[in-house]
Each structure stands twice: as C-alpha cells, then as structure tokens.
Amino acid sequence: MGLFEKKDKPAVEEVLTAEDIKEIAPLYEKVVLALKQVYDPEIPVNIYDLGLIYELNIRKSRQVYIKMTFTAPNCPMADEVMAEVKRSVEDVPGVSGCEIDLVFEPAWDQSMLSDEARVILGYDIDFDDDEEEPAK
C-alpha cells in the first residue's frame, strides 16, 4: 500500500460524544494551524486558505483524516505537497497518524478561497462566480 492510499474504512462510522469533541477541539485547531504552514508551490497562499482541504476529521484515536484536492489535477508537485501535509499534521503533538485522500470532485474553483486568500491574491472579497457585478 502506498503512502497515501486509502485504507478500508470501518463498517460503522465512529460516533464522538460531547466530551470527545471537547477533548479533540484544541487538537483540531493545531492541525489547522499545521495545514496553514503548507503552501502551494505556485501560489503564495497556504493550502487551507486556498480551499484545498475539503474534509478534516480527527478520530478518538487521534488519527487525522483529510480529504483534499489541488487547483489542477495535473499538479506536478502533488506528491511533494501531500508528503508535506502528512509530515506537518503528524508533527502536531497528540496526533497519532494522518490519512489523506486526494480527490478531484468537486473540482476546485476560486469560490473556495478564504477571504484571507482573496486579499493576498488581489481578488474582491465579495467575489462570487455565480453572480455578476451590478452595472454602474
């Protein structure tokens, strides 16, 4: 099995109690901060603010599951970025491991950018690709 290949998921989804969530919440914030240290090599914005992280879950075992994408399916640096994501997340104290699924559905688009990313890239913060700007 390769570094990022998906393992079989358990037949029953893990249910977290309110107490579990309270214990995991600080770890979740630390994982997000770790993801914000990983940058797309071609864009001066971190992968979290770019909207490349579609799903982030932490199990009771402190195993982190990430579903992510890239701005383009043919990203030449995909393996390196995914390895950096895995390393950064696994370096967070309290994380027992990291599993990453790379997906391309839904396709990434600019509407997934955070407000911080829009400012860095010079976009209008109210950008919405489904609506046109009103004529003045």
Image (cartoon, helix red, strand yellow):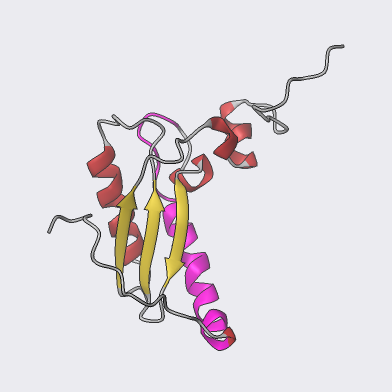
Number of on-image labels: 0
Q: Is 132 situated left or right of 5 in this image?
A: right
Q: Is residue 135 above or below residue 31?
A: above
Q: Residue furthest toward the right?
A: 136
Queried whether the magenta region covers residue 40, the answer comes back as: yes
Q: Is 121 situated left or right of 65 in this image?
A: right
Residue 42 at what x, y percent from top left?
Answer: 38, 29
Queried whether the magenta region covers residue 134, the answer comes back as: no
Front residue of this view, candidates 87 and 12? 12
Report whether residue 112 is seen.
yes
Quadrant in which the N terminus appears:
bottom left
Quadrant in which the C terminus appears:
top right
Q: Is 26 situated left or right of 2 in this image?
A: right
Front residue of this view, candidates 128 and 34? 128
Q: Is residue 38 above or below residue 94?
A: above
Residue 112 at what x, y percent from top left?
Answer: 56, 39
* Residue shown at 46% from the left, 33% from the top: 44
Front residue of this view, candidates 26 and 66? 66
| Magenta portion: prevailing SS class | helix
Q: Residue furthest toward the front?
A: 11
* Residue shown at 54% from the left, 79% from the top: 21
* Residue shown at 28% from the left, 58% from the top: 87
Q: Is residue 89 above or below residue 134?
A: below
Give, as a single range, the part of the protein colored magenta.
19-43
Q: Is residue 22 above or below residue 1?
A: below
Residue 60 in which image quadrant: bottom left
